[in-house]
Image: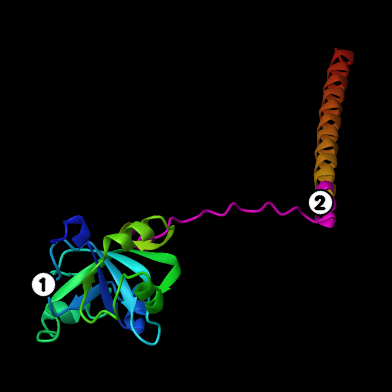
Amino acid sequence: MSQSTEDRQDIIIPIHPKPVANIVSRIKNHEFRNYLLPLSTQRLWIYETSPLSLIRYIATISYGKRPGEICNPHGLSNDEFDRGDLEGRVKYAYEILKLEKLQIPYSLADLKRNGWLNGAPQKYCFLKPSMRETINTLALELVFTSETLASSDKEPAKVTTPTAIIPKPQSQMKTQQTDRISKQKGKRVSLKRQNEKQASLQNWVKRQASTGLDTK
């Protein structure tokens, strides 16, 4: 009995724990293979090999890229693959577009007990419908998506910190207040002197006028 297209969208694939850790930390953003996965494949159920021997991560992937198609130096072995330096070892690169995590991993013993695997996968195998139905009822933790990573790579917006208004010391305030009072007093004294000079001048003019009248 052949599997439906939906049944062929998910495969279980073995990956060593160290490369898995590199995927989780985004040191590695492509999974490299020497063979082409079925074109219907959309998700990799990552079986971490010994000593862990469990499934806890599900990766949504791109199509199989050929050398020269990654065009992204930010990723382990990306440049080497694009240049063709890995020819003979790997032929295809699958970008990790999204990574999700099971809250409770499934050990190899669990997988065998549920009839989902007969043993550790050697190349890859399709996910059984019963396993998908069970997993679909579980909550998955989103580790990252390519969209969130692209946003985080942008330069963060600059945050303008408001300038704190620091109160002046009391002594400085008193000094400034004294200076203002002194200036005001100085202005009043200067104005008083101007008024006195003007009054003195007016008196002198009057006296001169009186003297002139007396001599006629």
Based on the displayed image, in which of its 4 quarters is residue 61 positioned? Answer: bottom left
Horizontal and vertical percent position of residue 112: 35, 75
Confirm whether the magenta stretch covers residue 173: yes
Q: Amino acid at mark 2?
A: Met
Question: As drawn, is 193 to the left or to the right of 126?
Answer: right
Q: CA distance from mark 1 to mark 2?
A: 74 Å
Q: Nearer the viewer, residue 164 or 17?
A: 17
- Residue position for label 2: 173
Q: Hey, which quadrant is residue 77 in on the image?
A: bottom left
Q: Quadrant of the N terminus?
A: bottom left
Provide residue 47's location: percent of width, then percent of height: 32, 76
Of callouts 1 and 2, the N-terminal one: 1
Name which residue type carries label 1: Arg
Query: Is residue 4 toward the left or the right of residue 45 in the image?
Result: left
Label drawn at residue 66: 1
Frontmost of labels 1 and 2 is 1
Q: Does residue 34 appear left or right of residue 97 in this picture? A: left
Mark 1 crowd level (few <14, some 14–19, many ≥20, 10 Å Cα): some
